Amino acid sequence: QVQLSESGGGLVQAGGSLRLSCKASGRAFYRYVMGWFRQAPGKEREFVAAISWNGDTTHYADSVKGRFTISRDNAKVMVYLQMNSLKPEDTAVYYCAADWSISNSVVAPLREYDYWGQGTQVTVSS
């Protein structure tokens, strides 16, 4: 089992940057594909980015490609989401999630993720 805790959210102006962090605890963190998802008010939770076991493969939603970067540090059991050129439409609660993936796939759907953090609010003002 893995426990996840996000931090780093806040209020930022459009065009600004934030770095989200996700601290994991539990066994075999290095065997989990890690993902970031977000949920805006009145909308369904959506995929943002995912990273493979050792970080050599990443996948991004089209809406954030070129602006966001996912990374991980297995030694520190941490996952990060660097968010640049933020837009008001990026406003949402951001969730870290872990997928016990035998295939090491970074394109697994939301339902495949086994563990979730409590979320951190990101608000981008125009």
Image: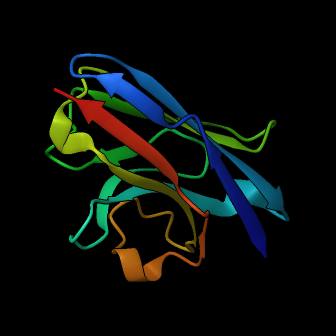
Looking at the picture, tell me which residue is in the foreground, 42 or 4.
42
Q: Position of residue 104 (x, y in %)?
A: 51, 63
* Vertical relation: 69 (above or below) 25: above
Looking at the picture, tell me which residue is in the foreground, 57 or 61.
61
Q: Residue at x 40, y 30 (%)?
A: 11
Q: How is the image coloured?
A: rainbow
Residue that sits furthest to the bottom in the current view: 111
Give the side of residue 114 with respect to residue 27, left or right.
left
**Residue 54 shows up from this direction:** yes
Q: Residue at x 75, y 65 (%)?
A: 3
Q: Residue at x 60, y 52 (%)?
A: 53
**Residue 82 shows up from this direction:** no
Quadrant where the image shows the N terminus: bottom right
Q: Residue at x 25, y 27 (%)?
A: 86
* Vertical relation: 55 (above or below) 49: above
Quadrant where the image shows the C terminus: top left
Q: Position of residue 95 (x, y in %)?
A: 49, 58
Give the side of residue 41 with respect to residue 8, left or right.
left
Give the side of residue 13 with respect to residue 51, left or right.
left
* Vertical relation: 108 (above or below) 82: below
Quadrant hosting residue 76: top right
Total residue callouts? 0
Looking at the picture, tell me which residue is in the foreground, 104 or 86.
86
Q: Position of residue 93 (x, y in %)?
A: 41, 55
Q: Position of residue 119 (x, y in %)?
A: 54, 57
Give the side of residue 117 with respect to residue 11, left or right.
right
